Each structure stands twice: as C-alpha cells, then as structure tokens.
Amino acid sequence: MDIKVNFSGRALKYTEAEIAVVVDAMRNGETLTQGRHLQDFQKKFAAYQGLPEGCCFAVMNGVSALELSAQLCMFKPGDEVIVPSHTFTASAYPYAKKGAKLAWADIDLATRVVTADTIRAVLTPKTRAVVVVHLYGYVADMPAIMELARSRGILVIEDAAQSIGADVGGVRSGSFGDMAIFSFHSHKNLTTLGEGGMLVVRDEKLAKLVPMLRHNGHCAYPGERPDYWIPAMGNVDMPMLDGQMVWPNNYCIGEIECALGVVMLDRTDRINAEKRVQALRFIDALAGYPELEFHRVDTTRHNYHLLAARMTSGGRDAFIRAMYAKHGVKCVVQYMPLNRYDLYVKLGLGQAHCANADAFYDNMVSFPFQHWLTEEEFDHMLAATKAVLDELRQG
Ligand SMILES: Cc1ncc(COP(=O)(O)O)c(C=O)c1O
C-alpha cells in the first residue's frame, strides 16, 4: 500500500531562522558543549515555566532527566514509587533501577492520566514518590495531586515529556511537582534535533548537586589556584547528599541543541495552539461517530502532542487495518500497560489493578498527527476515518 499519511517519527519542520541559529552555533560556537547556549536555554526555560532561575538543567534526553530525578530520591530499601501503568517505559524503569519498588496506578478512562483517587488507591506507608505523567499532552489534576502528596509526605515527579506548555490554571505542567522532566525527542512539540531533555529540581540543596551529577562529578577546586593548570584542568569530587555518596554520570547536552532550544521556545505556544485547533477540527468533524471517543479539551490544558481515541464498540484492529490497507493512513497503538511487558513481568511486576488502563489500551487508536500535516493529508485522513467507520457500521 502506498502510504499517504505516515505516522512519522518527526513532529516538526524547522524554520529558516531556526536553521540559521543552528548553523551559527556550529560555525561560531566557542565550545560545542557546556557553554553559553546551555546557560541561556536553562534560564529561558525557567522563565517560560514561571520558575526561578537555577532550577532547570538541560540534559541529553528525557530519560537522563528521569535517571537524575530517581538518584535524587535517595531510595531506602523497601521504598515504593507509584507510576501509571499506561505510560512510556522510561517513566518507570529509572526508579526501579535505583532500587525502588514500582506500584502501578490506574488512569481515568476519559482523560487517560492518573488522578488523586487512582494514586490514593495504591498508596502505602512505604510510598516515597509518585510519577505523574501528563500523557498525550494533557495535564493531570495537579492541584488535587499535590494536596494529596503534601498530606502524605511523598515526593511528586512530573513526567512532562509530552506536555510542554500545557497548563492548569495558568501554571504550566512541570511547575507543580518537587521535580519534573521534559523530553525534546524528535516526536515532541519542542525538539532539539531529535534528542534533548530538561530536569526541573525545586529543592535548592538537590539542585546544587545536579551539575556535578550531570557532568562526571566535575566541580570547582576549593580556593584560588596560583597556577590554573595545577593540579589538573578540573576537579573531581564525590557528590554527597545527606551523608551518602551519589554516583556521577555524563548526561550533558550539546551547545547546538541548546541554541536551537532557546529559539524553539519562542514558537512552542504557537505550535501547541495550532495542534489544538487541528485536533478540535478533527474531533468535531467526527462528532457523529460516538464509536470513536476522543478527549476533547479546548483550553491550553492539552497541547495535543498526540491525537488518541478509544473505540467504544470494539473493532479497533479492523479499523486500523482498513485505514492502512485501503487508505494508506498509518494509525498505531501506543502505551501497552507496563505490567504487561516482558521486562516488568520478569521483574515480578506483572500484576496491576488498572482496569481503565487495560480497557483504554486494548481499544486505543493513535492517529498520525505531526504539526506539519498538510491540508490535503488532514482531509484525506478525515475522509478515510469516516469511510472506515461507515463500513464497520455495516458490519
Ligand atoms: C511519557 C514519556 N516519558 C519519558 C520519555 C523519555 O524521553 P526521551 O525519549 O527524551 O528520553 C518519553 C519520550 O520519549 C515519554 O513520552
């Protein structure tokens, strides 16, 4: 089949001005890593988030931000971390890797994200943290979740990999929790050449440690050195937190990605708004087909990173097959509940009481929804969707 609308791995096309920024950083950058573009990106990101300077740290991808957040939790034996079962694997495994026991929270069927109630259902005295994932670009009910977390003394880490720019009551996702992570992967509404990430750390004591953990344990020498080259170019010390050592990593991101991130931030709100308009056009045009249930949000609480629907009358696989085989539109299925993956089954985490996550995943369709879809592609996808649903109605 000739593919007419592909589920592309690329969400955005860069403007000439953005390309010029990249070329300039390539040509004139005084260094290609750890330079002024990194500082500028972090500062501008904090301002975009409405956060104070000094709490945002650019890293090489979302997973390295998650790994750092897991390290900063300083888990003790028996500590548990609550994670939605319906998410990307990277929301979960960094915490298991650092020694926490994972507990799966269910999603709300209509919004596809966790709620204070679904988190409360799996809280135990051992719960140390909860990872709230704003999946598909929709921000979970953070005020209610923060209230619950504060009353129980647990840390909140927002996985805002998909929700840049989306907000609740004017507070952007990633600005509620104790920590937050963002991804600038190729598929996201802001991408820094395919890979990139940001870690937000609100506690000043933890934030101070991040540059060292991000860059091999490098730090300043104590005191002035009479000869700048003695004893060596840079110091290396042992990162310590509450009397315990934390191993360093190298999770640095390059200057060119950061230079691009700085200018991409100027376009993020517009990209989000354009995607939301497109999503609403698609959803509203299918209002006569209740067998395809979308999550319709006409505010900035959703950035429509992805456009996902649930088939309420079964027939999901027949739908995707016909969309592909007859119309060349490549829909996909995303986010198998993590407890159903081999990795987590083998880790003994195969059990979950997440009926909504299972019901959603077993009937979900994710449409190809890159920002650069042409009018022609959009119209073709819409006509194909109606045609296939009409056929399915006839049985
Ligand atoms: C929900 C979620 N969490 C984490 C990640 C990991 O981000 P990255 O691919 O930048 O490492 C992604 C994206 O890929 C994601 O969608």
Image: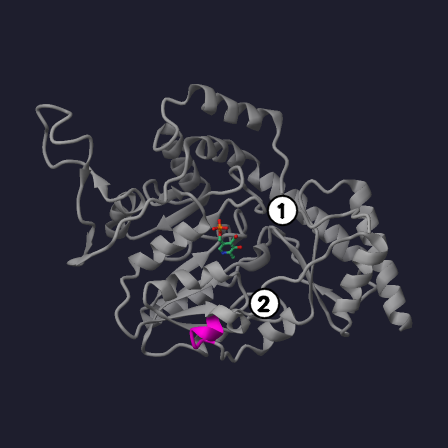
Amino acid type at image mark 2: Met
Q: Check disc 2 and report its element: helix, strand or loop.
A: loop
Q: Is residue 347 covered in magenta?
A: yes
Quadrant of the rendered structure where residue 324 is? bottom right
Residue found at x 14% / y 36%:
221
Q: Position of residue 2 (x, y in %)?
A: 82, 48
Asked whether, in this view, residue 296 is left or right of residue 42, the answer is right
- List x then y, in percent, for residue 51: 39, 45
Residue bounds of the magenta highlight: 344-349
| Quarter location, residue 41 | top left
The residue beneath circle 1 is 9
How many numbered circles does the render carry? 2
Instruction: Name the residue carrying label 2.
Output: 336
Colour mode?
one colour
Asked whether residue 142 is in view, the answer is: no
- Asked if one can make out residue 381 in the rendered structure from this viewpoint, the answer is yes
| Percent coordinates x, y for residue 110 in the rendering | 63, 68
Whether 324 is drawn above or below 371: the answer is below
Is residue 339 or residue 354 the one in the foreground?
Answer: 339
The secondary structure type at the circle numbered 1 is loop
Indicate whether 142 appears above or below 362: above
Q: Residues within 10 Å of mark 2 (few under 14, many from 20)?
A: some
Q: Position of residue 88 (x, y in %)?
A: 52, 60
The image quarter in which residue 119 lies: bottom left
Q: Amino acid at mark 1?
A: Gly
Question: From the Cβ of disc 1, is ligand 1 less than 8 Å away?
Answer: no
Circle 1 crowding by C-alpha within 10 Å: few under 14, some 14–19, many from 20: few
